[in-house]
Amino acid sequence: MRFNLSLASGIFEFEFKTFVKKALMLYQDDKGKSDHIQVSLQGGRLWFVFYVSNNKPGITGRFSSAQKYNDFRWHSVRIERNASITSFIVDHGTERKNFNTEGYLSSFDSTLLIGGFSLDQIINDVSNPDAFYLYATPLSK
């Protein structure tokens, strides 16, 4: 799914329920330049990755959940972004990670992707090609 919404600042929250171990849940970037934000499942654990640069040496944030969330129960994810802090919150605070991003505004101005990349996505248009290769390549049978 695609949305015209930016995660550059504000609050974004969603719920999910799954049994899969590996999935790209959310991705947005600055149209292939450098900044990006991503939520995925890897081995059933939630991964939150972002990079913001604001035209200077950037900040990378990475968080892997302690728990596995592919238990087919409802879970919530909340991302809070402002001028000084980026927060990733799972299940209303069960797991939480705050990142100091003071002075780093991001330009997440591409389409917000939920559930993966579209079939017509071009790799050169993605700021984090690892996300594309991990989740846009065909599964082997």
Image (cartoon, helix red, strand yellow):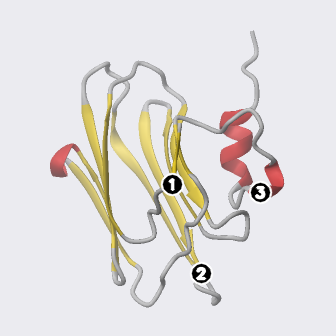
Q: Nearer the viewer, residue 4 or 54?
A: 4
Tell me which corner region of the image, top left, top right, bottom left or bottom right, holds residue 85.
Answer: bottom left
Mark 1 or mark 3: name the one nearer the start of the chain.
Answer: 1
Q: Is residue 33 left or right of residue 4?
A: right
Distance, label 3 to label 2, CA atoms, is 17 Å
Q: Which residue is labeled 2 in the image?
A: 53
Residue 41 position within the rendered picture, expressed as x and y whole percent measured from the top left:
48, 36
Does residue 94 lie above or below 45 as drawn? below
Q: Nearer the viewer, residue 21 or 122?
A: 122
Mark 3 or mark 2: name the one nearer the start of the chain.
Answer: 2
Distance, label 2 to label 1, CA atoms, is 22 Å
Identified by mark 2, the residue type is Ser
Q: Which residue is labeled 3 in the image?
A: 125
Mark 2 or mark 1: name the one nearer the start of the chain.
Answer: 1
Does residue 100 lie above or below 75 as drawn? below
Distance, label 1 to label 3, CA atoms, is 16 Å
Residue 62 position within the rendered picture, expressed as x and y whole percent measured from the top left:
48, 60
